[in-house]
Amino acid sequence: MLPDLPPLPALTRAEGELIDRYLDAVDLLGRINPGRHGDTYSGLRAAQALVSKAVALRDALELMHRRGETELHADTLARALRVLDGERRTARVTVPPPSGS
């Protein structure tokens, strides 16, 4: 049985879209990360997909700005990222620690 996750904080539709598109891009960057194990073909496919995800991320931010949502509420958005496993997902983008020798 899976543990109960905390509920997502209240987000506007545009904020929810921003979080979703951000995590889409992060997942692809994690697959491209040259410091992680993988093959060039899967990295290439992720890089190709990243282009459209970056456009979607830009569009989400643009929509927020047009609607007058000019401030990012970092604490609320960070809570949403944590609920959606953002810490694990973004960790794949960083340089891994050196292996013990």
Image (cartoon, helix red, strand yellow):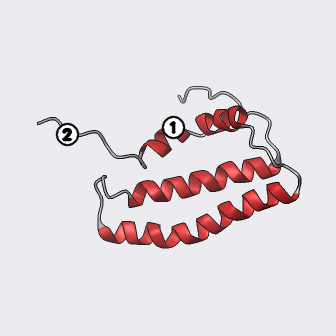
Tell me the residue at 38%/66% (across/down). 43
Tell me the residue at 16%/35% (across/down). 100
- At which x and y percent is residue 46? 45, 66
Q: Secondary structure at mark 1?
A: helix
Query: Dot 2 surroundings within 10 Å: few (below 14), some, or many (20 or more)?
Result: few
Residue 8 visible somewhere in the drawing:
no
Which image quarter is the C terminus in?
A: top left
Q: Amino acid at mark 2?
A: Ser
- Residue placed furthest toward the front: 70
Tell me the residue at 51%/37% (across/down). 87
Q: Would residue 32 appear left or right of 12 to someone viewing this image?
A: left
- Residue placed furthest toward the right: 67
Question: Which residue is denoted by mark 1 in the rendering?
Answer: 87
Q: Would residue 91 appear left or right of 100 to someone viewing this image?
A: right
Q: How many marks?
A: 2
Q: Amino acid at mark 1?
A: Glu
- At which x and y percent is residue 93? 43, 49
Question: Which residue is denoted by mark 2 in the rendering?
Answer: 99
Q: Secondary structure at mark 2?
A: loop
Residue 70 visible somewhere in the drawing:
yes
- At which x and y percent is residue 61? 74, 57
